[in-house]
Amino acid sequence: MATVTPFDVWERGSWCGQEVAGEQYYVKGWRSLLPRMLPTQGVELTDHALLIREPTNRHDRNAVRVEIRDRPVGHLPAEDAERYRPVLDHLAAGGFAARVQARIWASPEFEFQYDRRGEVREADTGRVRCRISLALPEPHLLIPMNAPPFEPHTMLPMGGSVMVNSGGVPMSVFEPVLNDAGEGWAYATLQEIYEQLTRSTRELIEVRINGRRAGQMTPR
C-alpha cells in the first residue's frame, strides 16, 4: 500500500455530521480501537480518520475508504463519495489524503428473549453495534484555493474571524481564490507595515493573498 501524507482539512468546527457506511464489514478494524469490555450504555471515542481513494474498487470507482489508525473502518456512502472524488483525487495526485476528526460510538447488542418461565428479558448477543461519523466539510471547503506562501512562515491556529478592510483593493486580487460555491478557504499572510503620518509613524498589519495586498486590519 502506497504511503500517503495526511492533509488536515480546514474546518470551522468538530461536529461529526457525515455518516460512514459499511461498518458491519469492517468489524475487525474498528473493534480493535475499542475497550475489550464495553459498558452497557456504550462508549464514545474521538480520533482522526483518513479518506483514502479507491479508484480500482470493483464495486464503485468513486469509492472512498475511511481509515482510523491505519485500520479500515468503512466507506463514505456512494452518493457522497461521488461528490468528494474530484478533490480527493487532487490530493492523492500529490501524495496526500484528507484527515478529519472522527467519532466512534459503540455498545453491546442486546435482544429480547423469553426465559423458561415465559418472561421477557434482555440478553447480550455477544455482538457490538458501532456507528462512525466524520467532521467533513463540503467538498469545496476541504482545501484552500491557493498554495501556501513560499517564504518561511508560521500557520496561525484556527480561531475566531477578524474582518479585513479591503477598500480600494482591485477585484483581480481575489479572482484567483474565488469559486462557484460563493465561499472558500485561501492562504493569506500578515505583514507588519508602517504608515507615515504627519509627525509620526503608525504600525499596521497588511493582509496579502498570493503576495498581493488584499486589505489591512484596523489599528485596533
Image (tube, rainbow, N blue to C red):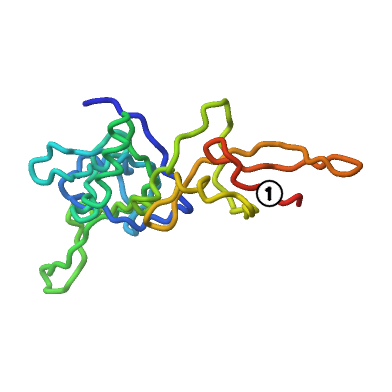
* Closer to the camera in the image, 79 or 128: 79
All told, the count of numbered labels is 1
The amino acid sitting under disc 1 is Met
Instruction: Please give the name of the residue rendered at 46% of the width and 48% of the height, measured from the top-left corner.
Output: 175
Looking at the image, the residue that sits furthest to the left is 58
Residue 133 to residue 34: above or below:
below
Q: Is residue 160 above or below residue 200?
A: below
Residue placed under numbered mark 1 in the picture: 217
Out of 2 and 15, give the one closest to the viewer. 2
Task: Report the side of 87 relative to 177 (left or right).
Answer: left
- Viewer-side residue, 195 vs 59: 195
Residue at 21% x, 65% y is: 122
Bin the neighbour count of mark 1 within 10 Å (Cα to Cα): few under 14, some 14-19, many 20 and up: some
The quadrant of the picture occupied by the N terminus is top left
Residue at the farthest right position: 199
Is residue 96 or residue 191 the one in the foreground? 191
Image location (x, y in percent) of residue 193: 73, 37
Residue at (29, 41) in percent of width and height: 88
Residue 72 point in image, percent of width and height: 23, 39
Above/below status of 162 relative to 194: below
- Secondary structure, mark 1, is loop
- Residue 138 in percent (x, y) is at 35, 54
Instruction: Tell me: 88 left or right of 213.
Output: left
Image coords of residue 216 (percent x, y):
66, 47
Residue at 32%, 30% in the rendered image: 94
Horizontally, residue 81 falls left or right of residue 118, namely right
